Amino acid sequence: MKPDPRRVAARQMQKQAGEVRFIKDKSNSAQEWAFDDGGVSERKISPQFAFSAKNLKPLAKVLRGTMSSLGFAMSAYNVFAKLKSSMISPDGALGGKGYVQKVSHMRRQYMNVVEALSSLSDTLYDELKAPHWDAAEQQEDPREREEVRDIIEDAEEIREDPEGWAEEEEEEMDDEHEAPEKKGKTASVCPRVTSRRNAFLQSKKAGEV
């Protein structure tokens, strides 16, 4: 005679201390965390709310940092996706004690990270370009206003090709780590980034004089 499934389930539940929860595994679901925004499509901004100019610079820095993170995440995912699991792991997993993950799960996580950063950067960019910040921008000190615009320009430059920008930055870092005898033979890896930095430093010095 087969045991009653309900009695078996009841005995198992009695053996467990505390709260009993049934958690559905969504690790293989297409509806993963980065793709489930759950947000709103429009806002209701009170006309009485005063947008302060002092908050523009921090927001601009968040945008630039998010765009930079997106570029590096895209570059890392592109490299990681080309690695065959069988070539880097005997068991299809990576990591040490307490931080073990399946390679296939890590690929999905990188996709989630890229999607989340892309969504965040789009939201921040639209926010900084929104007309409700125009009045606050006019209240800024001219130097602060110029700094905010420079930061946003940096973010826009990265936004054109986040992965390409990150690859140039990585190549520049790799070039710095090369042996001294190789450095003289290597041309400037990131002329666009370098020229922009030089121009920024020159304009900053000119403003301080």
Image (cartoon, rainbow, N blue to C red):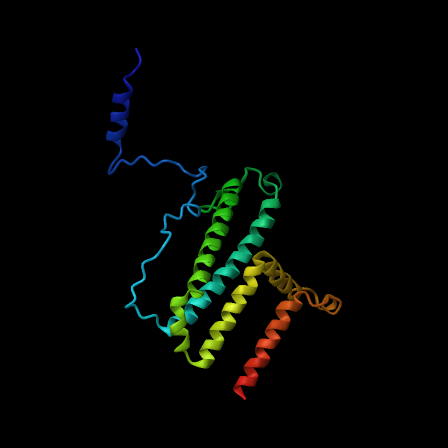
- The answer to which image quadrant residue 197 occupies is bottom right
143 above or below 167? below
Please state which of residues 125 and 205 is positioned toward the viewer in this rendering: 125
Q: Is residue 24 left or right of residue 107?
A: left
Q: Quadrant of the N terminus?
A: top left
Q: How many marks?
A: 0
Q: Is residue 8 left or right of residue 98?
A: left
Residue at the spot 32% in from the left edge and 62% down from the top edge: 45
Q: Quadrant of the C terminus?
A: bottom right
Please state which of residues 91 and 110 is positioned toward the viewer in this rendering: 110
> From this viewpoint, which residue is outermost toward the bottom?
209
Residue at the spot 58% in from the left edge and 41% down from the top edge: 89
93 above or below 113? above
Residue 16: x and y, percent?
27, 33
Residue 50: x and y, percent?
31, 70
- The answer to which image quadrant residue 22 occupies is top left
Residue at the spot 38% in from the left edge and 70% down from the top edge: 55
> From this viewpoint, which residue is outermost toward the right?
185
Please state which of residues 142 and 135 is positioned toward the viewer in this rendering: 135
Residue 117: x and y, percent?
47, 55
Residue at the spot 46% in from the left edge and 46% down from the top edge: 97
Please state which of residues 147 and 16 is positioned toward the viewer in this rendering: 147
